[in-house]
Amino acid sequence: MSAAESLVHAATGVATAPLRIVVAASAHGRSAELRARRTIASAAEQALLAALDAVVGRLMDDEVIDRVLARAKAEGVAEHVVDRILEDGIAEHVAERAFSGPELERVLESAFKSALPEELIAQLLASEAVWILVDEIARSPSVTEAIAHQSTGFLDQVIAKGRDRSRRGDERIQRIANRLRLHQASLRDEDELGSATS
Amino acid sequence: MRGDPLAAADALAASAGDYAGLVTRAIAFALDSVIVNGVALLVGVTVGLGVSLLHLPEQADILVASVMGVLWVLWSVAYFVFFWSSTGQTPGSRAMCIRVVDTHGRGALKPRRALLRFISLCLGAIPLLAGIWMMLFDDRRRAFQDRVARTLVVYTPAGA
């Protein structure tokens, strides 16, 4: 490099020094701005969440819930909702979905597999009221009649069938005997007629 | 009666419709025989086992057998006489829905008449059951014992 070129390079560096300072300052200012914005946004978010928590906490207060429910009751909201559910067929749809889907089956299966049925039966058997109920049912006239009817029903059927057949047998034998009687009577008449003519 | 023999026979059968016929009465009697002889058999076996344990002399065995025979006859007579004179229905008759009734009063028999009927039944059965076959040739289906004791055997409604 010649002396003239070095001089020009130095002069250019001196001449653009303020510009470089400005550019550097601008970059620092931009990053500072971004940091400040982030900090402000985070603080605002925190403040908003705190406010929301306060509002929700206030809403979940018993007094507020009681008020809302009292208002809803006074306005007949529950009846209206139930009416809409029934009128629109939502209840049928929900029931149909519950019964046709595999969820209910799974729930029942897991319930039966659990210890719940055994515990339930054990508690029922231990309950005195259940045995009183069973006694009452067993002593009821309709149940005793049904048991008696069940035990005698088959025998009655057999006897009734035998009775019908025996009566048909009576008629058949009687018919045969009557024919025999009439045949003998006709033979006797013919004999008498023959002896009278001879 | 001289026109169509089959129609005449049917008319005769219809006239005898209320009176129990041979088959029904035979089944009822068979059921009663099962009961009477079943009970007698049970008692006889029980007594026989008891006697065999006692090692009685032969004469005593004969005596016990004779007594048991007499008891069997008495039991049979008592069975029929009791039921004929109380309800007119033995258990066999009850099952077959027939009843022995008095010819006139249409009620149950007196014990003497019931006893007479039983004796007549035995006597009528001796000559090849001739006293029983007699009912086939009677308008009211009366057998020998019915004629002697003046009784009828009629059908009754089920459960009556």
Image (cartoon, coloured by chain):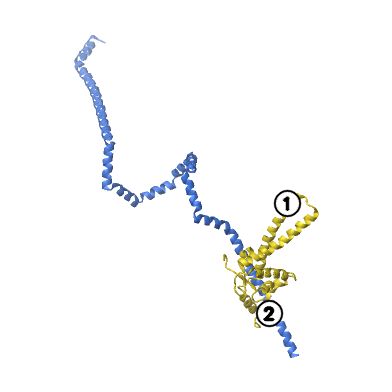
Residue for point 28% across, 34% down: A57
Give the color of chain A as drawn: blue
Amino acid under label 2? Leu
Q: Is residue A48 visible?
A: yes
Tell me where residue B101 appears, x and y as whole percent: 62, 71
Q: Is residue A162 above or below residue A38?
A: below
Give the color of chain B as drawn: yellow
Q: Is residue A176 visible?
A: no
Q: Nearer the viewer, residue B91 or B14?
A: B91
Circle 2 marks a residue in which chain?
A: A
Q: CA distance from mark 2 to mark 1?
A: 59 Å
The quadrant holding residue B154 is: bottom right
Amino acid under label 1? Gly
- Read off the residue under disc 2: A182
Q: Local crowd at mark 1 within 10 Å, few (<14), some, or many (≥20)?
A: few
Q: Is residue B154 above or below residue A7?
A: below
Foreground mark, 2 or 1, reads 1
Q: Are marks 2 and 1 on the same chain?
A: no
Circle 1 marks a residue in which chain?
A: B
**Pointers 2 and 1 in contact (C-beta within 8 Å):** no
